[in-house]
């Protein structure tokens, strides 16, 4: 092996090593959130008696496991529908089309999405428009008269089911 070939190979080997030293931590940092699984937790959203049968109420909801840089986006909301005195449906506020917050129209018993005209029935099923599936529902439980909502990870709007 002549000197030129040797130096060329050393340069390629050092370049590869440097690229690995710099690139692996960066790639790891970027894809790590995909593999981290935040533990699900139940957070209180109010007295269960507040969500009587036949009512649909907006509640503020702070995601307890936001990304460090989430800022204001960690603050979200939920729609709580009282089915009976002991049964509820808790909907994510985001439309399943592209994620706009849906609004409850009590007079029509419908959720309306202002962005592209998505419409959902009171039970979260799609009534019309572009939404590909019903509103995302969260698990809930009542303890000590307080309604708790599970902070489960939900699919991206427009994506597939969890
Ligand atoms: Fe709701 Fe498009 S985001 S219909």
Image (cartoon, rainbow, N blue to C red):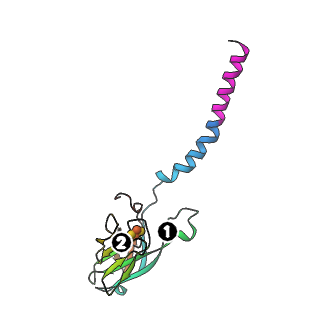
Nearest the viewer among 38 and 162 is 162
| Residue at x-position 35% and y-position 57% | 160
Query: Where's the N terminus, which quadrant?
Result: top right
Image quadrant where residue 67 sits? bottom right
What crowding class fits label 2: few (fewer than 14 Cα within 10 Å), some (14-19), or many (20 or more)?
many
User: In the image, is the residue at mark 2 within 8 Å of ligand 1 by its beta carbon?
Assistant: yes
User: In the image, is the residue at mark 1 within 8 Å of ligand 1 by its beta carbon?
Assistant: no
Q: Does the CB distance between marks 1 and 2 fall below 8 Å?
A: no
Query: Where's the C terminus, which quadrant?
Result: bottom left
Q: CA distance from mark 1 to mark 2?
A: 29 Å
Q: x%, y% of residue 47?
A: 39, 84
Q: Secondary structure at mark 2?
A: loop
Residue 2 belongs to magenta span: yes
What crowding class fits label 1: few (fewer than 14 Cα within 10 Å), some (14-19), or many (20 or more)?
some
Q: How many marks?
A: 2
Q: x%, y% of residue 159?
A: 38, 58
| Secondary structure, magenta segment, majority class | helix
Q: Which residue is mark 1?
A: 64
Q: x%, y% of residue 5?
A: 68, 17
- The magenta span reads 1-18
| Residue at x-position 50% and y-position 65% | 65
Q: Earlier in the sequence, mark 1 or mark 2?
A: 1
Q: x%, y% of residue 64?
A: 49, 68
| Residue at x-position 64% and y-position 41% | 22
Q: Quadrant of ligand 1?
A: bottom left
Q: Which residue is mark 2?
A: 118
């Amino acid at each position: 092996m002549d000197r030129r070939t040797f130096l060329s190979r050393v340069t390629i080997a050092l370049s590869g090593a440097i690229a690995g030293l710099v690139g692996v931590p960066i790639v790891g940092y970027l894809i790590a959130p995909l593999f981290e699984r935040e533990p699900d937790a139940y957070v209180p959203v109010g007295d269960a008696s507040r969500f009587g049968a036949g009512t649909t109420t907006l509640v503020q909801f702070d995601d307890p496991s936001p990304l460090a840089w989430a800022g204001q986006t960690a603050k979200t909301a939920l729609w709580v529908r009282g089915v009976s005195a002991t049964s509820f449906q808790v909907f994510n506020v985001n439309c399943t089309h592209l994620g706009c917050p849906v609004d409850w129209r009590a007079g029509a018993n419908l959720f309306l999405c202002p962005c592209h005209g998505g419409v959902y029935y009171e039970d979260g099923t799609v009534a019309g428009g572009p939404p590909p599936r019903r509103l995302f529902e969260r698990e809930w439980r009542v303890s000590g008269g307080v309604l708790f909502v599970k902070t489960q990870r939900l699919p991206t709007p427009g994506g597939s089911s969890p």
